[in-house]
Image (tube, helix red, strand yellow):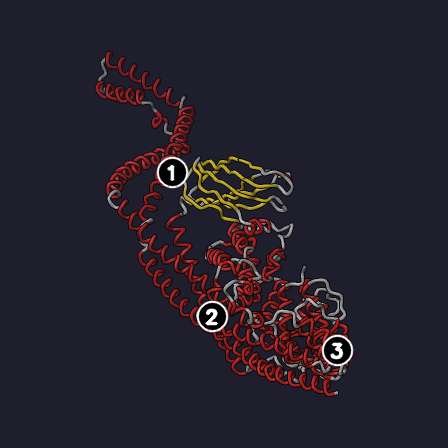
Amino acid sequence: MRLNIGIVSLALLLCLGSAAGGAQQPAPQKAPTKAPQKAQEKTPQKDQQQQMRGLDEEVQEIKSDVLRISEELRLLEEKLLYPSGTQVAVFVTLAKGDSMRLDAVRLQIDGQLVTHYIYSAKELEALRKGGVQRIYVGNVATGDHQLEVVVDGKPQDGADFSRTERFTFRKEVKPKLVALTLAGPDSGNTPVTLGEW
Amino acid sequence: MMRAPHYLLGLVLALGLAAPPAEDSKLRDLYFGEALFHVYQGQYFDALERLDTELAQYHGLDQPELDTLHYHINDAEFCVGDFELNYRMHRRAGRAIKAVLEGAVDEVVRNEAAYRLARIHFQKDQLDDAQLALGRIQGAVPEQIRDDIEFLRANIDMATGNPSEAVKVLEQLHSAESLAGFVAYNLGIALLQDGRSQEAIEQLDKAGRLAAGDPAGLAIRDKSNLVLGSILFESSSFERAKQSLDRIRLEGPFSNQALLRAGWAEATAGQYDRALVPWNLLVDREPTDVAVQEAMLAAPHAYANLNLHGRAALMYEHALNLFNHQIERVDASIGSIREGRFLKALIREESRQDETWVIRLRSLPDAPETYYLMELIASHDFQTALHNYLDLEDLRSKLMAWETSMNAFDDLIELRGRNYEPLLPEVDAKFRELDSRMRLRLEQRKHLGDRLQAMLTAPRPDHLATAEELNAGERLALIEKQLGDSESPASLALRQRAANLRGALTWRLETEYHQRLTAAYAHLKELNTHVDALTRQYDAFVRTRQAATHSYVGYDVQIERLCGSVGDALERVDTLMARQGEMIESVAISQLEARRERLVDQQTQARYAVADSYDRAARAQFDQEAR
């Protein structure tokens, strides 16, 4: 649906504004009641609106500052905990159009369990839309390493399934990025494909 | 020129996030994909932080075209603006979109950016800027936003007091199916603003009859009918007003107002019995609604006009009880807000699990303060204030977690220092020794390589002699020296033998030269393999050694600065939260007080009307008995 919420809200905003101001809606009630709407005074309302907008500007500023701190912190964290010489990051993505319900992914590097991730509906949806999840960041020495991937899930109309795939990746001096593309049994694609960056 | 795929450009639209990647769009940059992963979950802060970092790194590269983000750079620049907009950072979003506008992008992308910028300005009531941004749209316009642009243009015209211009634009926009209801309604309003009342009525009548399937379309159709009904009522066209109001759905957002006004249309025409139909329907609805409260007095008023004073008295009494109860509820709500419970309800995790959290606030237990605030909560500025409050709460949680991280980093660095410092001097001493030996060997290898290279142009067979041959050569030289220049026959015979032997040696060196040179090269190559392995080990050691130092040296200043920044930010967030919370509470309380004032007024009216109706009922009974 291309009718986007931005437009709708824009239209509704205008509708409300126009209907209230432009159209000058009549207050139809007569005796015995008084006009019930617009009970609030105009000027204080304007003042409050101004104050709210002023605060909004300040909130935007602090968001900017916190974002800057967050960026710096992330870089520091990477430098401290995952230096480029040993860093390995594993990413997960779903094959395009795949409809399986991904429940969990387990990763072992050189026989050691490094992560066991269980997916929420929101995360699964984000993967289906094309998002890429960084499932693991860690450290390994340069050289060849074994990666074992276990995928637990369920096809759209089928029983639970579990697939295990094993790969070898080579860690060089620069950070190693490993991308795993997962596919359900219905798709006809390889269950787990390894891509290296 | 890379064109942003729609799934990326559409991110600005909160609901448009569901759009899947275009078939031909292959994701090349994992970190960009990670930002999208966060965005698809509504985690704009994380997405922005990820993408900002990526973009900063990209722009800092000597050869950015070699980076994987290069494939998505235009999308990424656009997305930053989108994410910021969704994270309610309009100022930064505006700047980001302006950067796209001023960058080397194609016409279609630039026009879309201009449209978005105009929309931001419009939302912020910066109408001149909005018009300027729209003015920058020239040439090819993306098909999917063509109508949106014109619709926005008309909105701006209306907001700047140019309804006639808006009319012209909106009249051309009838083809836009998704916008049909809004266009039709706004055209009616623009005509009304332009003083063309009759045309406005006709237009709103059309808008009120449009077919609609989605909730937004149905709502705007109801709104058209409500406005039309009100206009017709004011011009005393009660029957037409009633027809228009009757078209409003009984379960829509405008149904209460429609029922109330339909009743007034009947009552004003003197049809009190018919007015009772919508009003009696209304009095059983949600008692906090303004229209329902209005109907609580209007219905007995109709009964009184039908001379059913007893029934009127009972209904007024019921209304009085309701107003008493509602005043108590409002008082409870005001008290609850003053105790800070409204803000606590807002930040409760379960209250914001999805996008409808504002609506669901009402159903939260222990949050009576929300009963009367739905109208207020629906207003744009108040929603922004609420969202800002929640954003601040999120920032506060993050900053507090980071404070803890900083302490952990400090501990980590200290531990690493304690671990490495006693070890490193010994390691360094051994390394220096190995380093000097290795350098010597490498020098020797280089020398050998140079000599072999030189022998390609100036053959030196003697350089390829074996140790035995060298030894034999030296011995021959010694013998030759000992024989000297003696002319005795024995010496001559011996010199001849020595010369034969040297000749044999030279013959061997000369004839085997090429074979030996090839073998020497093969050996040098073998040596190279070993040297390369050694160099790799050497480099790995140097890196590891550097990493050891880097793991704990040089962070103090940065961590101290970051600690300061986090602390300052936390302080500012706390202050802002307090101010934002106070503002929310004060707006909510003033809204509630206004409603309370109105309720007290209605209560007084009801109290008076109860007495009056009982009097009239008694008098009527007395008259009846007297007859």
Q: Residues within 10 Å of mark 2 (few under 14, many from 20)?
A: some
Instruction: Work out whether mark 2 precedes mark 3 in sequence or the reverse, and give the earlier one.
Output: 3
Q: CA distance from mark 2 to mark 3?
A: 42 Å
Q: CA distance from mark 3 to mark 1?
A: 99 Å
Amino acid type for the residue under numbered disc 1: Arg
Residue that appears at 28% across and 39% down = B431
B329 vs B229, left or right, is left
Q: Which residue is mark 1?
A: B536
Between B490 and B181, the residue placed more toward the observer is B181
Residue that appears at 75% across and 87% down = B627
Q: Which residue is mark 2?
A: B336
Between A196 and B570, the residue placed more toward the observer is B570
Which numbered dot is residue B273?
Answer: 3
Q: CA distance from mark 1 to mark 2?
A: 70 Å
Q: Residues within 10 Å of mark 1 (few under 14, many from 20)?
A: few
Amino acid type for the residue under numbered disc 3: Asp
| Residue A38 in view, yes or no | yes
Residue that appears at 40% across and 32% down = B529
Residue B496: x and y in percent read: 29, 15
Find residue A153 and report its image quarter.
top right
| Label 2 SS | helix
Quarter containing the N terminus of chain B: bottom right
